[in-house]
Image: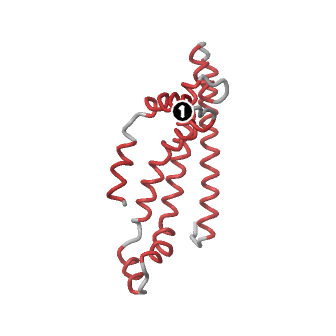
Amino acid sequence: MDRSMMPWIIASQTIPIIAIAPMLIVVLNAVGITGLLPKALISTYLSFFPVAVGMVSGLRSPDQLQLDLMRTYNANDRQVLWKLRLPSAMPYLFTSLKIAIAISLVGAIIAELPTGAVAGLGARLLSGSYYGQTVQIWSALFMAAILASILVAIVGVAQAMVLKRMGVRP
């Protein structure tokens, strides 16, 4: 699956989101889909890549000695996945989730730009640039940074809880 899907995942990230977001929003508006769904799709599109790459790295992280030990115990592929590969992938998952949180916030801001939204950080940035209000632009940027920090901290707390539950020492 890695060899078949990873080239497509990487190729999907070569398209600049600033180019595809307005087209996606216009197409979805034409079929009657408005509101948060187009913004969520753009954010999901941007956050999928780091999570997919992180999980592939995590699932490959067990070394050969661990895999040999599982074979010695006569473990089948499903047992190797559940007992070795997924627990080994958890640190990679949470690291990639932290990256994806920040990227999805950027995607949500970019998705607000072509919609003519009146609320949200993207709308604040756009109206501040239209009217030359640098304070409004900087305040939106600082709020985006604060929001990203809070969301990354929440993922960090979830990571600590999950890893503690799994028996991993800090």
User: Residue 97: x percent and y percent?
Assistant: 53, 52
Residue nearest the viewer, comparing 11 with 73: 11
Is the residue 39 above or below the residue 150 in the image? above
At horizontal 54% and vertical 28% (from top left) the residue drawn is 30
User: Residue 105: x percent and y percent?
Assistant: 57, 39
* Quadrant position of the C terminus in the picture: bottom right
Say few, some or many: other residues with alpha carbon within 10 Å of mark 1 (under 14 / 14 to 19 / 20 or more). some
Q: Amino acid at mark 1?
A: Leu
* Quadrant position of the N terminus in the picture: bottom left
The image quadrant of residue 143 is top right
Q: SS at mark 1? A: helix
The image quadrant of residue 11 is top left
Q: Which residue is mark 1?
A: 28
At horizontal 32% and vertical 58% (from top left) the residue drawn is 3
Q: Describe the colour scheme in one phrase.
A: secondary structure
Task: Please give left or right for residue 3 compared with residue 62 in the image.
Answer: left
User: Residue 49: x percent and y percent?
Assistant: 44, 48
Farthest top residue in view: 131
Residue nearest the viewer, comparing 25 with 92: 25
